[in-house]
């Protein structure tokens, strides 16, 4: 009940902030978050099917992840005695952080539905929030696999966050604002001073998103082969369902962020029902194309030793540095 | 005038409480309470005075002749000084409440003396912040160093004494630079008053010399790389409530000095000054956090994070100075605002983390993280507060560390907008450094929180840990609450600090907040609303809760299994990730920088060695001194005495003759 009241209060606050249109934008933000939440298992299901096809297997069908989630959510949890509050709270924290990102990024529209949390730094640190709790839960679960997974998760953050910051900073400097909606609108309007730099920044950020999604060869945190799914080893039942859903949401949100900022073509410009409907369909299609492309990349990659990963992520860092240099040169 | 009264009351109470505590040195409990309660009340008074000045946007000054003809006693309570007094008072308040129970650990070891030095330390820091005369500034600066030195060596063991010596050695040698700088200004202006320094227009070369002298002089006290080596030794050696004050507050006076001299006196007129400050800031932040990663001793880890955060503050300061020099008022204001905000935030969360570490040490009597684990079960309140501090320092939104780092990013972004190439290049590169720092700090505090409070206990003391007494919790909870307030209250706090920056720049405040939003001077550039974010995070919790509630999973209570799954083997604590193992990947990936550290080790060893050599040399020199100089002097005196005895014949007439002779000599001198 209090939660509901808080939401309502939030809506009043948003209305007071920017005007009456804000209520519509806020509704859009919630709808966008719910849409991505509901679509997340579909896309992870599609990923599984595509992976099976690459292996010349039949695959479980694209709806399998929904069935898995429902089954898990209905089952009893098993918790190690030494696990504490961090372990229990993390499934919720990860979901909430990712839902807030989903509300704040330009995806269906070419602007941030909630600009007050749609700044590029805020978004990157909301990802960090999920990472903090996810890693902490790994240590808290008292499993050795989870502990190593937690270490890897934070290490990936160290390698990946600078790439995200530099590539987004490059385009933001060219757009003159760190607001992701403004960056997207500038890219869409074609008024970026340097196309080469924008393209390079897109490649760098795309790489960073790929790493963030934990796709091969970067599935090091939840490495099934050597870590039994890393930080989520000890999760079971309802909590496992929520964590799995959170991870699927994180993947689709990261990808939507990439698409929304760098490929905003076709997203809704005005807040009419028609434009929003078209924007939603376009977003879902773009996500599908992206997932298929990612499936091609990840299923043709070999796994690497974890300690070598910094050498691979230097590609992303190099691309971001190149984008920055290009924008400096104004090419 | 009431503000000055509050300030005087605050300083007077600190001093009175300190002396009272010293007088009561025989009665530990009485000394603890006298020192703690007076410090807490004094801190409340100081907070009130500082808030009054910050909210008014300007404060009074006071001048008196003082006993020395060359220096008048001037107090100036401007918003910058008020910010520092606020920082000092808030942390002192929490630390003194904390000390009421914490000092039980030190029973019978001179609590009265500790209270004396602690209170005097706080008082001297307040006076450093408000003194507006070079002589008195340096006087209180030395008093601050001296009192904190005694807190560092309080344990009296070899390690503490060495750390204290290194601390004293480095800060003293670098405060020489400050004296030289002030003397140069004195020669130029003929006055030691800061007002004269402020008014003087210096030639660029002299200003640059003074910049370098004061930047390194104050930088050593702030603990920036490479002058930081004393910091991770000295801060952990002190008792935890004093560590909180040293690491949370005292280093900020180094920052204060840099801003006071470089921005206020010298007007930050040269662009390369700003870049130097920014470069040292970036180096401090990355290296500080990298070295923190490798620590097992929780207090040393926290001390290294002080180096990191000083770096972040210097980045904001440097960006602001570049903005002043290149004529960009927006950049100047946002840079200084970021520095001010992070100064305030860092002292709150670092104070909190040191008090948390102190609570853990109090409970299980070790600072070694490898012997902790699972403390959250025994000490849930301390664990929650420590988690808040960890989230703040890792810049997790919507807490306070995030807000000030957001402003720092925005300052660097504003620098990156150019138009000059140096700004366009170095601004974003510094932002990348900040991103690396942020990610490493996250890793470090996942490690610290996880290894200390989560999972299974590694050892008997950790398994039997008890929650600490209420006063200690009260101090910790106070600071944890402030972390939340300073984060969510950003829309009310940022304008106050922006006005303080505007006063310093003499340019008027830049708008940074409207309603529940904050923005870096221009709402089109970026907006942020931490209160809205908090509301949304809470509101969004409804979705997963709803999902969980409509399914059957919650109807059965979870089954608790005694151990985590270990591939069929017997689970034991040795299997789980250790403090070392957790940070191994960055250790491998950044091995180059860790090599730097092992090279830097010898530098510290050389210093250690020189300490040893000098004490040994003193031991050798003393007998030699004794044999030669002292003996000659005593022999000479004895010899002279024998001859003088001849003059004292005991005959009254001879004495009368002496008097007449003396009178004659005096008369001749007067005539001549």
Image (tube, coloured by chain):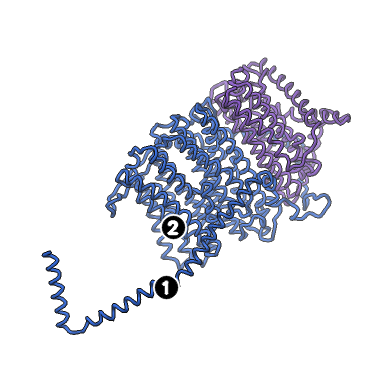
- The count of marks equals 2
Quarter containing the N terminus of chain B: top left
Residue A11: numbered disc: none
Q: Return the disc, 2 or 1, that comes first in the chain's sequence.
A: 2
Residue B146: numbered disc: 2
Circle 1 packing at 10 Å, graded few (<14), some (14-19), many (20+), is few
Quarter containing the C terminus of chain B: bottom left
Judging by the rendered image, the residue that carries numbered circle 1 is: B626
Q: Chain of mark 2?
A: B
Between A74 and B362, the one lying in front of the other is B362
Between A211 and A6, the one lying in front of the other is A211
Foreground label between 2 and 1: 1
Secondary element type, mark 2:
helix
* Colour given to chain B in the rendered image: blue
* Colour given to chain A in the rendered image: purple
State which quadrant residue B484 falls in: top right
Q: Tell whether B263 sits left or right of B427.
A: left
Compute the Cα span from label 2 to label 1: 29 Å
Say whether marks 2 and 1 touch (CB < 8 Å): no
Q: Position of residue B99 (x, y in %)?
A: 51, 57
Query: Is there any visible trace of residue B236 in the rendered image?
Result: yes
- Residue at (45% x, 51% y) in the render: B174
Q: Chain of mark 1?
A: B
Q: Position of residue B623 (x, y in %)?
A: 45, 72
Secondary element type, mark 1:
helix
Q: Do the dots labelled 2 and 1 sit on one chain? A: yes
State which quadrant residue B233 falls in: bottom right
Q: Position of residue A113 (x, y in %)?
A: 61, 25
Q: Position of residue B402 (x, y in %)?
A: 56, 38
Circle 2 packing at 10 Å, graded few (<14), some (14-19), many (20+), is some
Query: Is there any visible trace of residue A60 in the rendered image?
Result: no
């Amino acid at each position: 009940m209090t939660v509901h009241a808080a939401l309502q209060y939030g809506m009043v606050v948003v209305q007071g902030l920017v005007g009456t249109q804000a209520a519509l934008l806020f509704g859009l933000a919630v709808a966008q978050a719910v849409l991505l939440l509901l679509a997340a298992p579909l896309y992870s299901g599609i990923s599984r099917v595509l992976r099976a096809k690459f292996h010349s297997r039949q695959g479980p069908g694209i709806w399998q992840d929904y069935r898995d989630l429902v089954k898990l959510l209905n089952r009893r949890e098993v918790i190690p005695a030494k696990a504490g509050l961090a372990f229990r709270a993390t499934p919720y924290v990860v979901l909430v952080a990712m839902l807030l990102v989903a509300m704040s990024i330009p995806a269906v529209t070419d602007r941030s539905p909630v600009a007050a949390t749609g700044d590029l730094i805020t978004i990157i640190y909301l990802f960090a929030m999920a990472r903090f709790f996810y890693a902490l839960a790994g240590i808290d679960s008292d499993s050795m696999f989870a502990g190593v997974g937690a270490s890897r998760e934070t290490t990936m953050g160290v390698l990946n966050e600078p790439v995200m910051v530099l590539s987004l900073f490059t385009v933001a400097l060219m757009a003159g604002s760190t607001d992701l909606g403004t960056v997207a609108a500038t890219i869409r309007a074609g008024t970026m001073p340097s196309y080469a730099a924008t393209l390079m920044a897109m490649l760098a950020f795309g790489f960073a998103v790929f790493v963030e999604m934990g796709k091969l060869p970067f599935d090091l945190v939840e490495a099934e082969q050597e870590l039994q799914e890393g930080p989520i080893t000890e999760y079971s039942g309802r909590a496992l369902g929520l964590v799995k859903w959170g991870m699927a949401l994180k993947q689709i949100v990261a990808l939507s962020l990439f698409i929304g900022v760098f490929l905003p073509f076709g997203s809704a410009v005005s807040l009419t029902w028609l434009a929003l409907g078209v924007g939603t369909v376009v977003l879902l299609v773009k996500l599908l194309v992206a997932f298929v492309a990612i499936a091609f990349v990840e299923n043709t990659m070999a796994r690497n030793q974890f300690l070598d990963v910094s050498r691979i992520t230097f590609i992303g860092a190099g691309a971001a540095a190149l984008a920055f240099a290009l924008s400096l040169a104004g090419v | 005038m009431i503000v000055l009264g509050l300030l005087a009351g605050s300083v007077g109470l600190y001093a009175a409480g300190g002396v009272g505590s010293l007088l009561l040195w025989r009665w530990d409990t009485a000394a603890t309470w006298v020192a703690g309660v007076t410090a807490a009340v004094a801190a409340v008074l100081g907070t009130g005075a500082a808030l009054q000045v910050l909210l008014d946007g300007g404060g009074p000054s006071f001048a008196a002749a003082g006993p020395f003809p060359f220096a008048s006693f001037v107090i100036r309570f401007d918003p910058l000084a008020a910010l520092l007094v606020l920082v000092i008072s808030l942390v002192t308040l929490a630390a003194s409440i904390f000390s009421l129970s914490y000092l039980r650990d030190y029973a019978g070891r001179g609590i009265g003396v500790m209270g004396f030095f602690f209170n005097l330390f706080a008082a001297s820091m307040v006076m450093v912040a408000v003194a507006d005369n070079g002589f008195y500034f340096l006087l209180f600066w030395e008093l601050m160093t001296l009192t904190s030195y005694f807190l560092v060596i309080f344990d009296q063991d070899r390690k503490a004494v060495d750390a204290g010596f290194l601390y004293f050695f480095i800060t003293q040698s670098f405060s020489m630079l400050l004296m030289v700088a002030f003397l140069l200004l004195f020669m130029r202006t003929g006055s030691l008053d800061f007002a004269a320094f402020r008014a003087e227009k210096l030639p660029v070369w002299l200003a640059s010399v003074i910049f370098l002298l004061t930047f390194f002089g104050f930088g050593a006290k702030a603990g920036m790389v490479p002058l930081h080596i004393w910091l991770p030794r000295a801060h952990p050696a002190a008792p935890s409530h004093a560590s909180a004050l040293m690491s949370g507050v005292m280093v900020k006076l180094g920052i204060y000095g840099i801003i006071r001299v470089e921005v206020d006196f010298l007007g930050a007129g040269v662009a390369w000054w700003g870049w130097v400050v920014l470069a040292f800031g970036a180096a401090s932040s990355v290296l500080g956090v990298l070295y923190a990663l490798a620590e097992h001793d929780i207090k040393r880890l926290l001390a290294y994070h002080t180096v990191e955060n000083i770096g972040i503050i210097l980045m904001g300061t440097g960006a602001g100075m570049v903005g002043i020099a290149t004529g960009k008022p927006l950049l100047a204001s946002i840079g200084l605002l970021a520095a001010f905000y992070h100064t305030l935030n860092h002292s709150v969360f670092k104070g909190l983390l040191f008090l948390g570490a102190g609570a853990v040490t109090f409970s299980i009597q070790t600072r070694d993280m490898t012997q902790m684990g699972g403390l959250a079960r025994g000490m849930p309140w301390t664990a929650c507060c420590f988690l808040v501090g960890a989230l703040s320092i890792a810049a997790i939104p919507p807490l306070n560390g995030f807000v000030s780092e957001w402003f720092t990013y925005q300052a660097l972004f504003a620098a990156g907008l150019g138009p000059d190439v140096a700004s366009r290049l170095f601004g974003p590169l510094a932002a990348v450094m900040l991103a690396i720092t942020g990610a490493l700090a996250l890793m470090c505090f996942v490690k610290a929180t996880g290894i200390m409070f989560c999972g299974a206990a590694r050892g008997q003391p950790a398994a039997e840990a008890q929650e600490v007494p209420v006063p200690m919790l009260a101090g910790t909870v106070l600071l944890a609450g402030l972390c939340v307030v300073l984060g969510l209250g950003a829309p009310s706090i940022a304008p106050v600090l922006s006005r303080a920056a505007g006063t310093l720049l003499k340019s008027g405040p830049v708008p940074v907040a409207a309603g529940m939003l904050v923005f870096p001077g221009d709402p089109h550039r970026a907006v942020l609303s931490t209160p809205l974010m908090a509301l949304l995070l809470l509101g969004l919790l409804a979705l997963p809760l709803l999902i969980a509630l409509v399914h059957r999973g919650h109807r059965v209570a979870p089954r608790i299994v005694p151990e985590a799954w270990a591939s069929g083997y017997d689970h034991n604590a040795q299997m789980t990730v250790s403090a070392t193992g957790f940070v191994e990947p960055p250790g491998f990936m950044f091995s180059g920088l860790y090599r730097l550290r092992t090279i830097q080790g010898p530098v510290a060893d050389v210093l250690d060695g020189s300490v040893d050599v000098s004490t040994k040399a003193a031991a050798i020199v003393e007998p030699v001194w004794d044999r030669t100089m002292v003996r000659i002097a005593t022999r000479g005196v004895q010899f002279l005495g024998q001859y003088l005895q001849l003059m004292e014949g005991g005959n009254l007439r001879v004495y009368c003759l002496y008097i007449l002779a003396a009178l004659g000599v005096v008369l001749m001198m007067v005539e001549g």
